Image: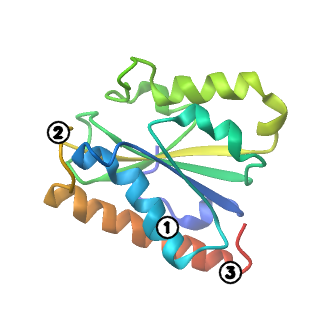
Amino acid sequence: MLDRPNAAQFPPPWGVVGLGNPLMGDDGVGPWLVAQLQQHNPQQWLRDLGTDLLGIANHTPYPATLLVVDAVRSGTMAVGQWRAYGDGEVAGVGGMRSAHQLSAPVALCLEQRRAPQAWQGVTLYWLLLEVAEIRMGPGFSPAVAAGGMDLLAWLQRGFAQQGAGGC
């Protein structure tokens, strides 16, 4: 787990996947981040998968570093705080269940097993932003809005460090 990672720790080129349901308040932070990034980084590999992580199969080839952004209720961080986790570390993070009781890490693991050739050479990280509750309705709580802006700024700096070439 990386509390405050340096963007240089993630080898380029990057891609960002946003997960979440914008109709459920704070849960929509992943898709919101992707939409914000697309405005300023149209050349980058950016995908809003909403609540359909298995839909990632339709977006090959993948970049060398894939950053999956999602909301989480782990109880291990302050609301609005975010952390980066390596793929092997994320299984222990609580609160990552979907409506179908299949967690996002398990869903992605299934996809990696289904098409292992598509994942060769891809390093996966999870950027998880802590939320207090998932409720119906658009908009973010103030703490999640601030945390989302902080994560957006971090991602923007990372893309800038990669240069204009993008993914």
Provide the secondary structure element on which disc 1 rests. helix
Tell me what residue is drawn at x 65 percent, y 68 percent. 44
Distance between the alpha carbons at the discs numbered 2 and 1: 26 Å
Q: Position of residue 31 (x, y in %)?
A: 42, 53
Distance between the alpha carbons at the discs numbered 1 and 3: 13 Å
In front: mark 2 or mark 1? 2
Confirm or deny contact between disc 1 and disc 3 (CB under 8 A): no
Q: Quarter-wise, where is residue 94 in the image?
A: top left
As drawn, 17 above or below 142: above
Q: Amino acid at mark 1?
A: Leu
Looking at the rendered structure, the number of numbered marks drawn on it comes to: 3
Tell me the quadrant of the picture where the C terminus can be found: bottom right
Task: Give the residue number, with chain letter if any, for mark 1.
Answer: 155
- Label placed on residue 163: 3
Distance between the alpha carbons at the discs numbered 2 and 3: 38 Å
Tell me what residue is drawn at x 74 percent, y 78 percent. 165
Q: Position of residue 87 (x, y in %)?
A: 58, 36
Indicate left or right for 53 with 60 as reference: left
- Label placed on residue 135: 2
Q: Amino acid at mark 2?
A: Arg
Tell me what residue is drawn at x 48 percent, y 33 percent. 90
